[in-house]
Amino acid sequence: MRYPLWFAVLLAFVIAAPLRAGGKVAIVRSSGFSLYEKVVQSFKQASKTEIVADVVITDDGDRNEALLQDVRSKKPAVILTLGTSATRLVREKVPSIPSVFAVVLDPTASRLSPPGVPVDVDPVAQVDFIRRNFSRIKRVGVLYSPGLNVEAVAALERLRAGGESIVLVEVPALNKLNESIGTLADGADCLLMLSDPVIYSPQTAPQLILQLIQRRVPIFTCFPAYVKAGALAGLQADPVDNGRVAASIVDRILKGEKPSSIAYAWPSKYVISLNMIVADRMSIPVPASVINSAEQVVK
């Protein structure tokens, strides 16, 4: 059956109109952190949405309220929040508009529900990186605090249930940290650091790294600063990938998917840091491909 031209044009308009009306996105940043700008640029390239506001929150409550009022007035369909502070503020003050977070460490510890993109690298991807590049390491050890990194620990438990040699050591309290380090060193070939601010604080991390170096247990971390301090390698989430994944979540919401049905989405790409001094002292061979692809190499 043939339809008149005017009918086809009208039908196309009706189908496209909801997408155009729902394509507005506001961005709220926790600070002027340069990493956020990389994520935003990646988001803009990956998503065809219209950015109607891009604001940075401050320590001034009245100022923040004015910023959020401006955001509300633009009537975005979704708000992209960058960092924990902006995410908490938007979800408290603008609950009627769906929000998607990015660049947030351990969202479960901050009680930030999906949808969103943690800045942590997927622990499954980290284990895979170790397996592919460091064949001598058979048992991957992990220290974790109760109630923190719940999603990451659950993912590692699933790996262990599937046959991977994962040594999970809970640290019930800081006064048990040395004991837990000993348990891990006795049962694992390396330590995979999670983003745990209790175990890996500025006060505890240096001593922990020193103890494991003395026991010749290499460390894999998500913090480049710890690579300089003595960890063997670091995997940091690629900000470009973080923005791309956030864009895919926003687009799903704009197409009608309920935010409550969307789980956390780990970034799948990462930036590598290496400490070749540690590798040499521990006689750990590092593939040339890993060295060549590393963004930071300590020699």
Image (cartoon, rainbow, N blue to C red):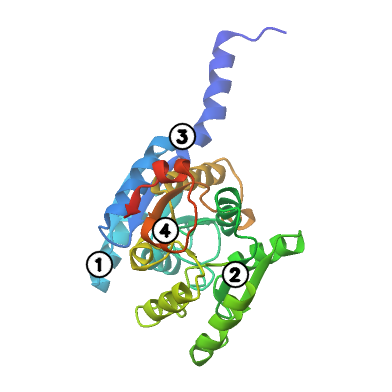
Which residue position holds label 3?
20
Disc sitting over residue 280 in the figure: 4
Q: Position of residue 290 (x, y in %)?
A: 46, 45
Which residue position holds label 2?
141
Cα–Cα gap, marks 1 and 4: 46 Å
In this view of the protein, which residue sits in the foreground, 134 or 257?
A: 134
Badge 1 or badge 3: first in the primary sequence: 3
The amino acid type found where label 1 is placed reads Thr
Residue ID at (51%, 87%)? 178
Q: Position of residue 254 (x, y in %)?
A: 53, 43
The amino acid type found where label 2 is placed reads Gly
The mark lying in front, picked from 1 and 2, is 2
Cα–Cα gap, marks 1 and 3: 31 Å
Location of residue 261 by image quarter: bottom right
**Horizontal arrangement in the rendering, residue 97 relative to residue 164 (left or right):** left
The mark lying in front, picked from 1 and 4, is 4
| Residue 197 makes an appearance in the image | no
Badge 1 or badge 4: first in the primary sequence: 1
Badge 4 or badge 2: first in the primary sequence: 2
Residue ID at (40%, 55%)? 274
Disc sitting over residue 58 in the figure: 1
Cα–Cα gap, marks 2 and 3: 49 Å
In this view of the protein, which residue sits in the foreground, 229 or 66?
A: 229
The secondary element bearing badge 1 is classed as loop
